[in-house]
Image (tube, helix red, strand yellow):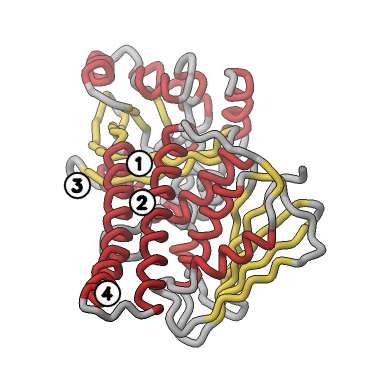
Amino acid sequence: MDSGSKRDDVNEARATDLPAAQATFFAPAERKPPAVVAAQITQIVDHPVVKTMLQAFCGQVLVLNRERQILAASREFREALHAVGIDDFAGLRPGEALQCDHAGEGPGGCGTSLACRHCGAVMAILAAQCSLGPIHDECWITMRREQGHASIELRAKATSLRIADLDLVVLAMQDIGDQKRRGVLEQSFLHDARNLLGGVITWSEIIAGGDASDEATSSLKHLVLQLRDLVSQHNLLARAEKGDLVAQKVPINLSDLAAAMSAGFAGHPHGHDKRLVVRFGSEARAPVTDETIVRRILANMLSNAFEATSAGGTVTVSYDVHAGCPRFSVHNPGFIPDDVARRIFQRSFTTKTEPGHGIGTYSMRLLAERYLDAEVTFETTPTEGTTFYLKLPNA
């Protein structure tokens, strides 16, 4: 993003400064007006404690006023935003400067939305303001970018600081994304691989015992193919995360894709006593896109749908052309609660307690936005269930 458009975004955010009486869903919404923020910056910018701290600390460091507005920032933070100087984001709150996806949802900007209740940075800041000492927390931020959404994981540490008559908070943020990404990918792969290898071993022992039935050989072949696909899928995601993936867009054969969907989930571990319905209209125009990536996205959607479906339930995958754009959808009868729905695309977020989860929905949007110029959305209600959509661009 160029500096001109960045300043336009900053000015737009500043123009929405709210009165003190403005409601909030979490942290206070009040802000200091630009003139007061400018005076506060002047008061601290040359203070030796502030200058030494910003130069000495590693990572991204911010100095915030009582209203959580930025008064000073380390060089690392400015570089992360491609900012020329403090004027590019002075007076904004951290989530607004980082273009957090939830920053504009609350009535008073960053910190005031329902999703902000789960933000480790806001929690650390508020705790520091209550004089609870240096507070550590983890912060997952989904940022808006020109090429789509990007996720970062930060370890946030906040501590209070008083200079002259100003009550300040120093917020230090360390990027732990690589650590989290490796951990989630490794745990996810090992979790899935263990499940598949358990089945391979079981059927292999049956065959070795002399019972080489058609069922045993067929099941073993199916599990081996699933294991092969698992390795390919994790390699695909690893390349996508690094930016090394190149989409190969060609017309998709919908009949072959429908057959693959049915065959691939015939023995799904969460598919017992559940039904999969594939509805690909024969008259629908075939999309021109990368079939490997589409299959990966639909596989994640279907896996989540099966997990959310009770025994006897039905999962439906469909394809149509909606508003001129090719669209896949996966429906299940389950409902996603609001607190989960607000965080569902965050990398590493999961409602599961065991390791090996927390990357499926994130990877859907990563692959769709960055490599297919597509969009992943969902709708969920207690009465209608949940539907995830993969909306492709109109070729």
Q: Residue furthest bottom?
A: 312
C-alpha gap between disc 1 and disc 3? 24 Å
Viewer-nearest residue: 369 or 277? 277
- Mark linked to residue 207: 4
Q: Position of residue 67 (x, y in %)?
A: 41, 39
Q: Position of residue 306 (x, y in %)?
A: 47, 73
C-alpha gap between disc 2 and disc 3? 28 Å
Q: List the residue tagged with mark 1.
A: 153
Viewer-nearest residue: 223 or 56? 223
Q: For residue 388, what is the image quadrant?
A: bottom right
Q: List the residue tagged with mark 2.
A: 348
Query: Of the residues shown, which amino acid type is indicated by label 2?
Result: Ser
Rate crowding at label 3 as few (under 14), some (14 to 19) or many (20 or more) other CA atoms within 10 Å.
few
Q: List the residue tagged with mark 3.
A: 132
The residue sitting at 48% across, 29% down in the picture is 91
Q: Of helix, strand and loop, which one carries label 3?
A: loop
Q: Nearer the viewer, mark 2 or mark 3?
A: 2
